Amino acid sequence: LPIYLARLAKDVPGLGPVTTMYAREAVRSYTARNYLAATVMLGVASEAAMLDMAERLAECYKDTALQNTLDDERTPYNRKFQEVRKRLDARKQDLPHELADGMSLTFDSVLDLLRVNRNDAGHPTGKHFDRDDCYIALRMAIRYLKKIAALATFFSQGRDTGNA
């Protein structure tokens, strides 16, 4: 528990408090062998990080349509993510290489895996998650959260819009 959280804090210093809270809970659940709970909490941490980054993206580009989508509680998370993804894809050439590189893989694989697993674990599907499933998800989450936090920092600095 302390090793993972120390690594998360070291590798992702800009992680928001809500994301950190859920990541911490995911690790606690994992160490207690509550793998369904760990899977749900990790998915919620992922969602919190994505929404935090999305807020900064909307603010950076003064994108009121995206902000309205994010603010609408009736809009499902998957739809919000799709709107964010469209905007990121359209501005990919504006991003530094280290943020743009592998972005599709990060979103199409890691984020989607965390989201789908969370949905499967959080609904009465009967799907089983074991120690190995959770371990792999926790390991992948650090890289994913690092990229999301770096994007959030980039957008909060308003680098390519002249707002910095």
Image (tube, rainbow, N blue to C red):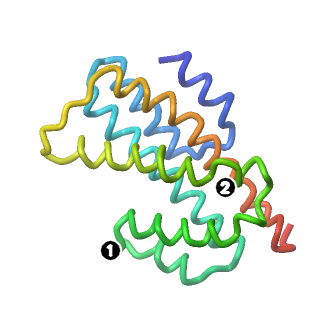
Residue 152 picture location, percent across and down: 67, 55
* Residues at marks 1 and 2 touching, judged by CB atoms closer than 8 Å: no
Disc 1 to disc 2, C-alpha distance: 24 Å
Q: Is residue 11 above or below residue 58?
A: above
The percent position of residue 124, horizontal first and vertical second, equals 13, 45
Q: Which residue is mark 2?
A: 152
Q: Residues within 10 Å of mark 2 (few under 14, many from 20)?
A: many
Q: Is residue 117 above or below residue 63?
A: above
* Position of residue 11 in the picture relative to residue 4 (left or right): right
How many numbered marks, from 0 up? 2
Is residue 68 positioned above or below 84 on the image? below
For the residue labelled by badge 1, is the local secondary structure a helix, a strand or a loop? loop
Looking at the picture, tell me which residue is in the foreground, 83 or 104: 104
| Residue drawn at (62%, 52%) of the image | 103
Q: Position of residue 91 (x, y in %)?
A: 70, 69
Q: Amino acid at mark 2?
A: Ala
In x, y percent, where is residue 70? 48, 71
Q: Is residue 90 left or right of residue 116?
A: right
Please tell me which residue is depicted at 50% across the width and 80% down the height of the picture. 68
Which residue does the image show at 42% across and 26% down from the upper left? 27
Q: Where does label 1 land, which residue?
A: 74
Q: Callout 2: helix, strand or loop?
A: helix
Asked if residue 99 is positioned above or below residue 64 in the image, the reply reads above
